[in-house]
Amino acid sequence: MDVYRVAPLGAPIDATVWVPGSKSIANRALVCAALADGQSVLSDVPDGDDTEAMLDSLRVFGLEVERVDSTVTICGGLQFFRKGPLTLPTRLAGTTSRFVTALACLGPGPYTIDGAAPLRRRPMAPLHEALTAMGVTVRALQEPGHLPVTVQGPTDVTLDEVHIRGDISSQYLTALMLIAPYFTNGMRFVLTTPLVSRPYVRITAAVMASFGVTGVELGDRIITVPAGRYEARDYIVEPDASSAGYPLAAAAICGGTMRVPGLTDTSMQGDAAFCHVLARMGCEVRQDATGTTVSRHGPLRGIEIDMVDLSDLVPTLAAVGAFAEGATDIHGVGFIRNKESDRLTDLCVELRRAGIDATDNRDGLVVRQSRPHTATLGTHHDHRLAMAFALVGLGASGIIVEDPDVVSKSWPDFWSMIEGLR
């Protein structure tokens, strides 16, 4: 589709939506399964582009990978990694490209990691610099600190400690944490700047523990990973909390009730707390061992919030804020300018096209209650902007979303879900 015309609901919601498995958890589990000797079976694996890029890369490495519906079977072990030169295709997937770059240094190499043009613009320097400090040969083929890059690992990493920035993306740290058990002495990571998106690092440690590497220590500025080996296992991927934010936010905007089964009060994902943000805005929330339910029957209120630990949901909350009384002031998220798009400026520019009072600043943005009007909104190659604009369209008439297929990055059936709300 070139564009998607979002028809407003015009009535309160009463729906149950099953969201795909977490791509963040799935990609971490896939790396662990790739390194573990033996067969692992992963269930509820999402089918978005990020996950498919990871599966493609694992096949290029030489691993036997089979997908049947949402179940992925991997026969893992470093002994199966093929000698290069090989090129690993990571499409538009920032997470996958960073994880695969780190994973490549454990194989015989050399491996070239590359992706589509928008991915080549995204920053990779902190990861490349950390790998170089470990003795890995990292050769940029175009612009330093960006893809494409060729990686050749040493026969062993004996370094005990590496310094890395934490204020650009937690994915650099996660990529290194996932491979650190296979170093002679494990690894001690010293953060030279405060860590953003800390809940994602907790997810990393939890997934590693599920595959047999326990004892990861998460300090404020020091992360310690012991030496060890992953163990093959069966693993169920829990529903994606970031994706769940869209149907839950739809209930906040349109009124009524939305249920997301499986996203429980024991979720390891920080984004599972988004429902409590909606509660602050006037929604009724129930989150228990069966799932999450959000209802709204009264007015929405704007809030002030630090979203450093909920950064993927900034566009989602901005959409809700356009329908909330007063102002919604989001801060602590200046680092999301380096995502698939500049998720502050690009988001606000597009919202203003629809008549929404949205202004970005160095650290976040402010959205005020508005009366959205007919507009065609650009997605800037960013799935999260596309899905947030769909929410605006559910609550206001005349919203047209360009390049709607970009949602395939994380939720290929997103537009079917939107239609199902009717």
Image: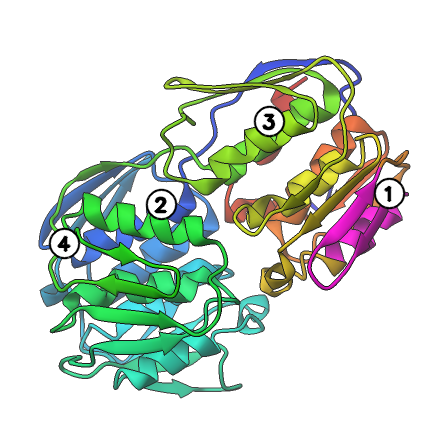
Q: What's under tag 1, amino acid-wise?
A: Ile
Q: Considering only vertical position in the picture, is 253 above or below 182?
A: above
> Which of 413/252 is in front?
252
Relative side of 272 to 87, left or right = right
Q: Look at mark 1 in the image and give the residue it sits on.
A: 356
Q: Secondary structure at mark 4?
A: loop
Residue at image coords 79%, 25%: 8
Q: Secondary structure at mark 1?
A: loop
- How far from the left and from the top, in percent, is residue 306? 62, 48
Q: Considering only vertical position in the picture, is 268 above or below 81?
A: above
Q: What's under tag 2, amino acid-wise?
A: Ile
Q: Is residue 99 visible?
A: no
Q: What's under tag 3, amino acid-wise?
A: Leu
Q: Is residue 254 magenta?
A: no
How many neighbours does mark 2 have within 10 angstroms: few (below 14), some (14-19), or many (20 or more)? Answer: many
The C terminus sits in image quarter: top right
Q: Real-space Cα distance between discs 4 and 1? A: 49 Å
Q: Real-space Cα distance between discs 4 and 2? A: 16 Å
